[in-house]
Amino acid sequence: MFNVKWGIIGPGGISSTFVDDLLLPSHQTHSGRDQTIKHSIVAVGSRDVLRARKFVRDHVGTEGGCKSYAGYEGVFADENVDVVYIGTTHTHHYAATKAALLAGKHVLAEKPFTTTAREARALINLAREKSLFLMEAVWTRFQPMVIEIEELVRGGKIGDVRRIFADLGWDAQIDGLSSTSRVISPELAGGALLDLGPYPLLWPLLLIPEASTSLPSSISASIQKTQLDSIASQVDAQTSFVLNYDQSKAQAILSCSITSETFGDSAVVIHGSKGTISIQHPCFRPESYTVKLFAETEAESTKEEETVVTKIAGRGMYWMGDEVGRCLRDGKLESERMGLEVTLLQMEIFDEVRRQGGYELPEIEL
Ligand SMILES: NC(=O)c1ccc[n+]([C@@H]2O[C@H](COP(=O)([O-])OP(=O)(O)OC[C@H]3O[C@@H](n4cnc5c(N)ncnc54)[C@H](OP(=O)(O)O)[C@@H]3O)[C@@H](O)[C@H]2O)c1
């Protein structure tokens, strides 16, 4: 059994979910867990030590000796910590990841990895220089149903991929949010794209052959900004972007929103030359998909139709945790399923979408 000793910084919403998931006994989770990996939370750091202590009480338990730190430096310096999970808000991923790497720690950083490609590139270079593991926490890639869909598509079940529609909308009720909320605050790089955009974008990056190694041949983007009186400068409320991959003759039509909800079975639709796969909302944690193959004769409506359903226990972030464990155990500095070059491509696409949509982020000092 390989024991992964985690340090957590930014003990807020997603850190709670991640830790609850990691500590779920594997027999209570979905199949596909790695029985050779065990997870221990050994340190938690927050700007407010009381928040760190409460997090340990509520999510870790006080028996295992997990330490609570005021600030993040204690976690980075703690010799017991193997890998640091960065659960802070977007604009704080860069500084925290950099400090953890400089202290010699492996890092799993929440999505969006950084706010710009420039920051992402600097972190990737630093991790490579120091020979440390680094990964963006795109947990969806490690879910068994997502791997199954990828295998179907790569195996040619629906023929060549021609178009991918993917959407993630969440009605965050932004009129009622505090102006300091990370969802709408420009200082915290709020908005739909960085928060939700990694999920629709994941699908072409996974399924269009050239997308995991090269930038799209062209990008067209449109941003509608929030129109809130409570804040001086506005973030992106609804963002749509079309990516053309000319070598693969495929197009991705992607959207995200913090003002409108996605429902039903149209979260992702993959159009192939022989059929389609529709994936039910939410596209970050699908529990159902339907394959339809086109009819070969006019008498049939479709040749074959099959719906596959699963039920994920907890949130389903543990598969990603297990992958980090495997990489550390095997001395890998990158995950093959969520490599750093893909993260960089994602951040470059987001830079271009924001450039076209006129959304400028606060400059982060490297
Ligand atoms: N993977 C997923 O499914 C998923 C889901 C939700 C969010 N996320 C990502 O996770 C990150 C955190 O989201 P969240 O919803 O968990 O955020 P959150 O609960 O609002 O905040 C998380 C932590 O960030 C720090 N923080 C919050 N506001 C800050 C501010 N104004 N200045 C400096 N630090 C601040 C705090 O750390 P301290 O305790 O140290 O003060 C807080 O504990 C985001 O980047 C988001 O995109 C991922």
Image (tube, helix red, strand yellow):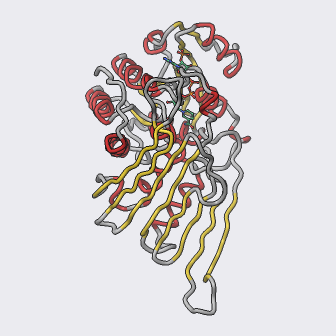
Query: Residue 223 falls in which quadrant of the image?
Result: top left
Toward the viewer: 28 or 251?
251
Q: Please determine whether, in this image, residue 85 is positioned above or below residue 311.
A: above
At 56% from the left and 67% from the top, the residue drawn is: 277
Query: Residue 106 falls in which quadrant of the image?
Result: top left
Percent x, y of residue 239: 46, 46
- Quick check: which quadrant has ligand 1? top right
At 61% from the left and 48% from the top, the residue drawn is: 285
Toward the viewer: 261 or 34?
261
Q: Which quadrant: the C terminus?
A: top left
Percent x, y of residue 74: 47, 9
Q: Please determine whether, in this image, residue 228 is positioned above or below residue 294.
A: above
Toward the viewer: 35 or 107?
107
At 59% from the left and 64% from the top, the residue drawn is: 278
Q: Please determine whether, in this image, residue 57 is positioned above or below residue 109.
A: above
Toward the viewer: 285 or 58?
285
Q: In this view, does 13 lie to the left or right of 344?
A: right
Q: Which quadrant: the N terminus?
A: top right
Q: In this view, does 209 lie to the left or right of 298?
A: left
Tally of numbered discs = 0
At 33% from the left and 67% from the top, the residue drawn is: 248
Extreme residue in the right direction: 28
Percent x, y of residue 69: 54, 8
Q: Please determine whether, in this image, residue 304 is positioned above or below residue 172.
A: below
